[in-house]
Image (cartoon, rainbow, N blue to C red):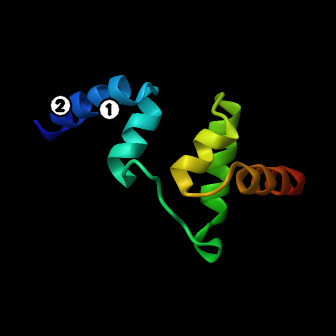
Amino acid sequence: MLGTLENYLALAVAILANCDSEVAFHMLEYGPAGKHLKREDIRETDIMEMSKLKKAGYTYRQIGAMYGLTHGAVYNRIRRFEGRI
C-alpha cells in the first residue's frame, strides 16, 4: 500500500512542480530543495549520479537544485569526474 501511495504522491509532485517522475521521486525523498550537501559530503557516487542525470537530459540548474549546488559547481564536478574516467 505504501508503494502505491508513494507513486500517487510522486505523480502529484510531478504535476505541480512540472517535472518528470525521476525528479518527483527525488523531491519526495530529499525535499523540494534537494540534498544540500557540503563540499566534503559530496561522494563519488553523487557525482556519478549527477553525470547520469546530465546524460538523461537534465540541465545543470535542475541537477544543482537536487543537490543544493549552483549550476557552475555541478558543471565543474561532472567535467572533472568525466575527465578522470
Residue situated furthest right in the rendering: 83
Quarter of the rendering containing residue 60: top right
What amino acid is at disc 1? Val
Please tell me which residue is depicted at 64% across the width and 29% down the height of the picture: 56
Q: How many marks?
A: 2
- Image coordinates of residue 4 in percent, x first then y, are 17, 31
Left or right: 80 with respect to 65?
right
- Which of marks 1 and 2 precedes in the sequence? 2
Quarter of the rendering containing residue 38: bottom right
Please tell me which residue is depicted at 76% across the width and 51% down the height of the picture: 78
Query: Secondary structure under badge 1?
Result: helix
Crowding near the residue tagged with mark 2, few <14, some 14–19, many ≥20 C-alpha atoms within 10 Å: few
Which is more toward the observer, 36 or 82? Answer: 36
Left or right: 23 with respect to 64?
left
Please tell me which residue is depicted at 65% across the width and 72% down the height of the picture: 39
What amino acid is at disc 2? Thr
Please tell me which residue is depicted at 25% across the width and 30% down the height of the picture: 7
Label ID, residue 13:
1
Left or right: 66 with respect to 4?
right
Q: Nearer the viewer, mark 2 or mark 1?
A: 1
Query: Secondary structure under badge 2?
Result: helix
Residue situated furthest bottom in the rendering: 40
- Image coordinates of residue 32 in percent, x first then y, are 39, 47
- Image coordinates of residue 3 in percent, x first then y, are 20, 37
Label ID, residue 4:
2
Distance from Cα at disc 2 to Cα at disc 1: 14 Å
Which is more toward the observer, 7 or 34? Answer: 34
Which is more toward the observer, 6 or 39? Answer: 39
Quadrant, the N terminus: top left
Crowding near the residue tagged with mark 1, few <14, some 14–19, many ≥20 C-alpha atoms within 10 Å: many
Quarter of the rendering containing residue 84: bottom right
Left or right: 15 with respect to 1?
right
